[in-house]
Image (spheres, helix red, strand yellow):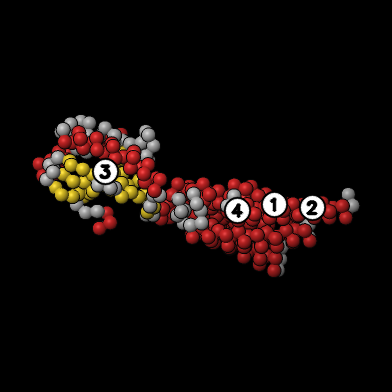
């Protein structure tokens, strides 16, 4: 094949990557994140293929285009903290898209850092550093929607793989950084989970209504059994672990002090680290106001009560 024919083919490949990127931007601006999820990685895959072929002008052009698109994508990613996602599925698709794009950026940057010199090597290491920064942000941060926490893990996997590559290189400095990076990856995996465990999420109105509709009838039935002193059925909706514990003893011991159950007030609900909490103001015939908190792992039809506690003050007052 003649040189000009090859140039036409490489030009076509570059334009195809650019077209895919334009579609990705269009989809993203139109909040069609599924379309962006397909178009962004396709664009990066085409540019990466051209870069890896090292076709001088076209490889340089593709790398610079990747650099530009990366800055644009990272700028858009910063909007996550502003809560730009209307639902959990949108955030999930975006996080997966960003992880895939960072993987391509790292692959291109590592390739240039290995084979290029001068300003090209500097740009490559700058991109590696920038990618690692975003990996840390999204890998250890808590998502806007708690069910998407698992999608922060691919970012730390990228960091782990990058450092394994550093260990396999011949340069002593990179080997040292790689070993430290692998240890840091494992630490951040645990650290991110620790931060998530302390994060409190307020349920939206739909989730709140669904949880209350699931729990309130069961809670009222439990305390009807309490009033009837049918303690064998008091914990019939409890999970296996809670059901095997002598959980009714505090209520039996305090029956003379509390009196019969009267009513529940409007509960406050929240989510922490994958668990749902519903705090009911509750009145007994001999006690004006106490706060009963139920702990749930979910509120599907077959869900059970994981735990509960009673206190004199609300969680908000502690």
Q: Nearer the viewer, residue 159 or 68?
A: 68
> Residue at horizontal 59%, vertical 49%?
32
Q: CA distance from mark 1 to mark 3?
A: 53 Å
Residue where numbered disc 3 is placed: 308
Of mark 3 and mark 2, the one earlier in the sequence is 2
Q: CA distance from mark 4 to mark 3?
A: 45 Å
* Quadrant in which the C terminus is drawn: bottom left
* Label 3 Cα neighbours within 10 Å, binned few <14 / some 14-19 / many ≥20: some
Of mark 1 and mark 4, the one earlier in the sequence is 1
Of mark 1 and mark 3, the one earlier in the sequence is 1
Across and down, in percent, residue 297 comes to 36, 41
- Which one is closest to the eye, mark 2 or mark 4? 4
Tell me, for residue 30, which label it has, or none. 4
Specify whether 161 is left or right of 189. right
Tell me, for residue 188, which label it has, or none. none
- Could you say whether the residue bearing mark 2 is in a helix, strand or loop? helix
Residue where numbered disc 1 is placed: 20
- Which one is closest to the eye, mark 4 or mark 3? 4
């Amino acid at each position: 094949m003649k040189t000009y024919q090859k140039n036409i083919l490489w030009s076509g490949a570059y334009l195809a990557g650019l077209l895919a990127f334009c579609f990705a931007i269009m989809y993203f601006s139109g909040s069609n994140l599924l379309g962006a999820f397909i178009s962004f990685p396709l664009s990066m895959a085409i540019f990466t293929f051209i870069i890896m072929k090292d076709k001088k002008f076209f490889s340089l052009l593709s790398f610079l285009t990747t650099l530009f698109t990366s800055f644009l994508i990272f700028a858009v990613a910063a909007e996550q903290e502003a809560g730009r996602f209307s639902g959990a599925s949108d955030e999930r698709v975006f996080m997966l898209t960003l992880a895939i794009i960072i993987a391509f950026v790292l692959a291109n940057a590592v390739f240039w850092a290995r084979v290029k010199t001068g300003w090209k090597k500097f740009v490559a290491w700058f991109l590696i550093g920038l990618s690692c920064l975003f990996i840390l942000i999204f890998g250890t941060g808590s998502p806007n929607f708690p069910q998407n926490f698992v999608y922060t893990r691919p970012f730390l996997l990228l960091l782990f793989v990058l450092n394994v590559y550093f260990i396999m290189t011949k340069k002593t400095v990179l080997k040292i950084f790689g070993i430290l990076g692998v240890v840091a990856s494992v630490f951040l995996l645990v650290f991110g989970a620790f931060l998530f465990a302390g994060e409190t999420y307020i349920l939206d109105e739909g989730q709140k209504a669904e949880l209350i509709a699931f729990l309130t009838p069961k809670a009222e039935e439990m305390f009807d059994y309490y009033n009837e002193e049918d303690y064998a059925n008091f914990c019939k909706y409890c999970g296996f672990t809670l059901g095997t514990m002598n959980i009714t003893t505090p209520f039996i011991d305090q029956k003379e002090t509390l009196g019969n159950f009267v009513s529940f007030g409007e509960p406050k609900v929240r989510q922490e680290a994958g668990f749902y909490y519903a705090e009911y103001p509750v009145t007994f015939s001999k006690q004006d106001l106490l706060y009963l908190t139920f702990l749930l792992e979910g509120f599907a039809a077959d869900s059970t009560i994981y735990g509960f506690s009673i206190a004199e003050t609300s969680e908000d007052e502690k």
